[in-house]
Image (cartoon, grey):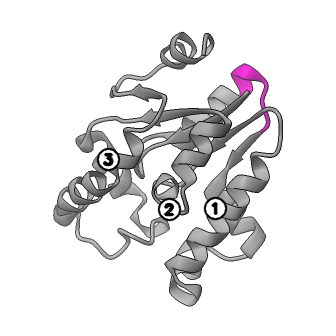
Amino acid sequence: MKIYLLGFMGAGKSYWGKQLADHWNLPYYDLDEVIVETEEMAISDIFATKGEDYFRERESMLLRELSKQDNVLISCGGGTPCFQDNMDFMNEKGITVWINPSVEVMVERLSRKKAKRPLIQDLEDEDLVDFVEKKLAERLQFYQQSRHIIASDNITLETFTKNIDHA
């Protein structure tokens, strides 16, 4: 079983990735963490020194590399599905799950961790809602291709197991 967790920044991909990997006893990778580890620099530094195109190429390559495993759960970066035909690749190789909480919930989470997020670190809190709504609208066409969509602010482990255990 290959499972890809998708969604916008602050959707809960990393949190649920760890929970689900434990539940299903699957190897777990947070794609952003793997990139940081292999590049030996923070994502914000990669963006600043090497550019977003370089980052997206590395992201796509590592996604494909990790997907060679028979069983794996990968939490993807918020932009992963939108580049390099990654969405088609993930749908072809495994189960895609879009975690889609409300904008309010994501903004609240992101406002606490802006420094770690290169795309929002310089935004004022009042500009965060507009940014999230605009960026989410751009990415919607990719996220909507997910095989499973979990649109809730009150997700539990059961939310996933009801939808995916029988996939």
Dot 1 and dot 2 residues touching (CB under 8 Å)? yes
Residue 17 on image: x %, y %: 61, 36
Give whichever of 73, 45 is nearer the camera.
Answer: 73
Q: Is residue 144 magenta?
A: no
Q: Is residue 163 above or below residue 2?
A: above
Locate residue 153 relative to residue 27 in the image: left or right: left
Locate residue 145 relative to residue 91 in the image: left or right: left
- Residue drawn at point x = 33 percent, y = 47 percent: 141
Disc 2 on helix, strand or loop?
loop
Decide which of tag 1 and tag 2 comes sooner along the chain.
Answer: 1
Residue 93 on image: x %, y %: 67, 38
Disc 1 on helix, strand or loop?
helix
Decide which of tag 1 and tag 3 comes sooner along the chain.
Answer: 1
The residue identified by callout 2 is: 83
Start and end of the magenta stretch? 22-27
The residue identified by callout 1 is: 60
Q: Quadrant of the N terminus?
A: top right
Q: CA distance from mark 3 to mark 2?
A: 13 Å
- Residue drawn at point x = 25 percent, y = 43 percent: 103
Instruction: Name, please, the residue furthest toward the bottom.
Output: 49
Disc 3 on helix, strand or loop?
helix
Label of residue 140 in the image: 3
Mark 2 crowdedness (10 Å alpha carbons): few <14, some 14-19, many ≥20: some
Amino acid type shown at disc 2: Phe
Label of residue 91 in the image: none
- Residue drawn at point x = 51 percent, y = 32 percent: 97
Mark 1 crowdedness (10 Å alpha carbons): few <14, some 14-19, many ≥20: some
